[in-house]
Image (cartoon, rainbow, N blue to C red):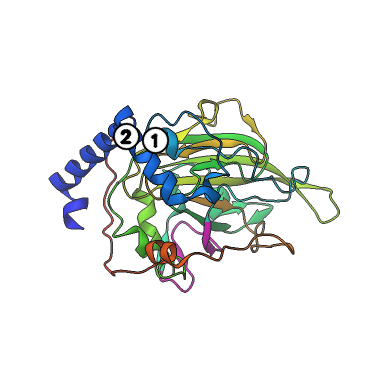
């Protein structure tokens, strides 16, 4: 961990990741596509839209053509998953330095949003509804869908996809999943320093009778983990500042994608607006996995603690 997060070792691995990304954009990487398709199998691949898979990265951001219907399209109170993911953490009463219950770790929302003033929506609230909000962590598996979508409808009032950070600061991706008890005991504070972006969506709130209940904000924070050097937003969602014209977004719209590696999305909500995961009868709550995949992705191999370091300067 000292080697990958300090000095020349850290710089060397940043260079290596940059070159690896170039390799995955090169036509020679197409040879990997067939291997991945075979490993995923015909049942999984049947979900994806056949496209220009002339490089590995083009395959990695393969798209799902309408096989994920958006729940509650006409109900603005319904929050949807931003991507295919594992929900591994829900934390309430966020502050500038929140102690995550039962896990003994901290998560600094202002650092996560790279100093954005919007952090106060989720850590302090507003005069009419003061207090800290809620964070929900959604982990993407390395072999699943890597686009992320808007969890709610509204207006994007601020967005960035260029926050620099570490590439190899994570001790091991399977460690994050921790034998199926996903994320328990993991040090989420390190996400402050991984490559990431964020989207702040201003969205209307309604009461239980369907009457307007003011406006609020929801944040989507895509975080690139091991060897992920690209957090890519669609052009219309890039570099939106408080002085920009807000950009309309509909629930389920594509926001951007990751290329190559492990990653996650963190959702942030204002106080009292997202009290729990709430599922309806008949909705998917998981999958009966084959043992081979479970052993590969959900096993805990070693326990070392990451070191927090300043971000790298790669663009």
Q: Quadrant of the N terminus?
A: bottom left
Left or right: 22, with 249 as reference point: left
Kindly tell me whether residue 150 is visible in this rendering: yes
What is the secondary structure assignment of the residue under circle 2?
helix
Residue at left offset 48%, top offset 43%: 146
> Residue tagged by mark 1?
57
Of 70 and 132, which appears nearest the observer? 70
Q: Quadrant of residue 287?
A: bottom right
Relative image position of residue 265 (x, y in whole percent): 49, 49
Of 11 and 263, which appears nearest the observer? 263
Q: Quadrant of residue 68?
A: top right
Q: Earlier in the sequence, mark 1 or mark 2?
A: 2
Of 72 and 291, which appears nearest the observer? 291
1 and 2 marks in contact (CB < 8 Å): yes
Label 2 crowding class (10 Å Cα cut-off): few <14, some 14-19, many 20+? some
> Residue tagged by mark 2?
29
User: Magenta region: which residues?
Assistant: 86-104
Q: Residue furthest left?
A: 8
Left or right: 185, with 285 as reference point: left
Relative image position of residue 85 (x, y in whole percent): 53, 54
Kindly tell me whether residue 142 is visible in this rendering: no
Residue at left offset 43%, top offset 61%: 293
Which of the two discs, 1 and 2, sits closer to the camera? Answer: 2
């Amino acid at each position: 961990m000292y080697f990958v997060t300090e000095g020349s070792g850290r710089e060397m691995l940043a260079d290596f990741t940059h070159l690896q990304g170039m390799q995955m954009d090169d036509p020679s990487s197409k040879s990997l596509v067939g291997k991945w398709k075979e490993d995923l199998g015909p049942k999984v691949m049947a979900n994806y839209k056949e496209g220009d898979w002339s490089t590995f990265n083009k395959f990695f951001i393969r798209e799902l053509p309408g096989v994920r219907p958006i729940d509650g399209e006409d109900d603005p109170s319904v929050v949807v998953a931003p991507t295919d993911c594992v929900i591994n953490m829900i934390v309430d009463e966020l502050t500038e330095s929140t102690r995550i219950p039962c896990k003994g770790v901290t998560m600094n929302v202002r650092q996560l949003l790279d100093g954005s003033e919007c952090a106060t929506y989720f850590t302090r609230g507003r005069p009419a509804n003061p207090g800290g909000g809620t964070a929900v962590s959604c982990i993407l598996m390395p072999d699943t869908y890597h686009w992320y979508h808007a969890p709610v409808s509204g207006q994007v009032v601020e967005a960035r996809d260029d926050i620099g950070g570490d590439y190899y600061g994570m001790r091991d991706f399977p460690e994050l999943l921790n034998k199926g008890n996903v994320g328990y005991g993991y040090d989420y504070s390190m996400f402050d320093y991984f490559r990431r972006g964020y989207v702040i969506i201003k969205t209307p709130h309604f009461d239980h009778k369907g009457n307007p209940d003011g406006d609020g904000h929801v944040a989507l924070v895509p975080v690139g983990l091991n060897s992920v050097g690209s957090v890519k937003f669609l052009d219309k969602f890039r570099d939106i500042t408080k002085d920009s014209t807000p950009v309309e977004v509909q629930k389920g719209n594509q926001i951007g994608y990751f290329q190559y590696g492990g990653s996650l999305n963190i959702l942030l909500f204002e106080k009292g607006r997202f009290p729990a995961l709430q599922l309806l009868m008949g909705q998917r709550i998981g999958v009966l996995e084959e043992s081979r995949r479970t052993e590969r992705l959900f096993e805990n191999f070693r326990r070392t603690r990451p070191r927090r370091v300043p971000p790298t300067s790669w663009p």
